[in-house]
Amino acid sequence: MLVRCLFPVLLGAALLAGCAPDPAVDRQAILDEVMANYRANVAGMRPLTAPAIGEGEARAAMPALTGTPTQTAQLLGQPPSALRQLLGEPSLRRTEGEAEIWLYQSPYCHLDIMLYQERGAPAPRVTYANARASGVERRTEASCLQEVAEARLRR
């Protein structure tokens, strides 16, 4: 008898619970998480110093990349020619002191690259690279690099 009396109440509560709005996305919490990850990435980066080589010896600071990189760390030590081959021309280039800053953009991601030429080096090398989402949507580093590489094909 008690079950019969409570059944309509429980059924009504279950139906009303199904109509409840989805929980709100806390965009500020997502932005805080993204910024914390960005700061950790920057703190973990160390400028590359190429090993000393004899005069006339020119060798790559890092192995040549084949295919789209999946981590920004794979870009470290690469010359501008490798970046152009993999990612095309940057959307923006500017000089800051002795460094050159390149920005690649796709609809949802940005890739920041810093190139620096050491004294006596034949060409500048990537000393810093960071892939980031351009909005509040979450993107992995690999998906950002893939999007930037694909944007090159659409240009």
Image (cartoon, grey):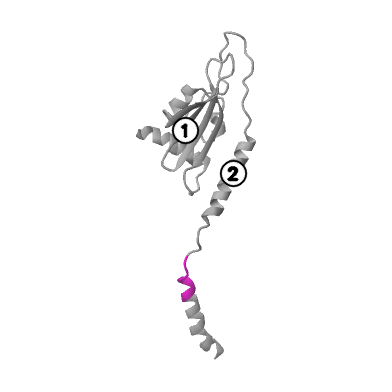
Q: Residue at x 53, y 15 (%)?
A: 122
**Amino acid at dot 2:** Asn
Q: Which quarter shows the N terminus?
A: bottom right
Give the labeled residue for mark 2.
37
In the picture as drawn, the residue positioned furthest to the left comes out as 155
> Can you give x and y, in whole percent of width and height, for residue 96 in the image?
53, 26
Q: Are marks 2 and 1 in contact (CB under 8 Å)?
A: no
Residue at 42 percent of width and 32 percent of height: 91
Q: Is residue 117 highlighted in magenta?
A: no
Q: Which residues are magenta?
A: 15-21
Cα–Cα span, label 2 and label 1: 19 Å
Q: Is residue 54 above or below residue 125?
A: above
Q: Residue lying farthest front?
A: 97
Q: Secondary structure at mark 2?
A: helix
Residue nearest the viewer, comparing 143 with 97: 97
Residue 103, labelled with which disc? 1
Q: Position of residue 63 (x, y in %)?
A: 55, 23
Q: Nearer the viewer, residue 104 or 72?
A: 104
Label 1 CA crowd tier, 10 Å (few <14, some 14–19, many 20+): some
